[in-house]
Image: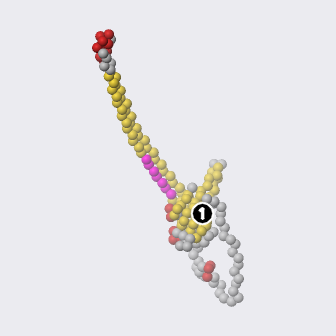
Amino acid sequence: MDYAPIYTPEELPEDAPAFGSIYKPNKGSLFAMEGRANQVGDIITVAFTESFQATKSQNAASSRSSANSVTLPPVVDNMIPGADLFTSSGENTFTGSGSTAQSNSLTGSVSVHVVRVFDNGNLEIMGQKKLTLNNGDEYIRVSGIVRPRDISADNVVQSDRIANADIN
């Protein structure tokens, strides 16, 4: 996925009506304007609240035993003293277990652009943040779909409220 910033085309000034008011219907309310993102190019801050935990354990056991005996002809019994004691047996036993545990969390924030507005008002967002840490570049990339009602008045959305979130 290409994470190049998306900018809205520069708006051309509208021809002012010769007579009329200063109110413009497509620019919001005259005295109070809701500043929530709702158009392509608007910026939303994603606040990360991710925490994941996973555990796995496994047990294994196996056992094997065998026995062998040799029956010698009576002639050999007389030639070799104690030949009747030729027997062997063996036994192997294995028991093992293992477990793993993993815990990850991500905190912080990144600002993203609205790249598409769906017919139902939902917003597709996409953005990245580049961090230079320990002489190397690290990128945090975010994309997904946000419902307008999940965006706070200061244009912040929690990461767990992003549908089809791709955070890497």
Residue, x 63% and y 60% (percent of image)?
Answer: 3
What is the image's colouring?
A: secondary structure
Residue displayed at 51% across by 71% down: 149
Of the 4 image quadrants, the one containing the C terminus is: bottom right
Which amino acid does the dot numbered 1 rest on? Met
Write down the residue under mark 1.
126
The answer to which quarter of the image holds residue 37 is bottom right
Quadrant assignment for the N terminus: bottom right
Nearer to us in this view, 88 or 69: 69
Q: Position of residue 34 (x, y in %)?
A: 57, 75
Q: Is residue 115 left or right of residue 162?
A: right
Q: What secondary structure is the stretch in magenta mostly built from?
A: strand
Identify the residue at image location x=69%, y=86%.
17
Residue 163 sits inside the magenta stretch? no
Horizontal side of residue 108 vs 4, given as left or right: left
Residue closest to the eye, 155 or 166:
166
Q: Nearer the viewer, residue 121 or 81?
A: 81
Taking 66 as reference, is 14 above or below it?
below
Q: Is residue 57 left or right of residue 30?
A: left
The magenta stretch is: 50-56
Using the rendered image of the protein, determine whether residue 158 is visible from the camera's viewpoint.
no
Q: Which residue: 65% across, 63% down?
A: 5
Return the x and y of residue 162 as percentages of the image width and height. Answer: 52, 64
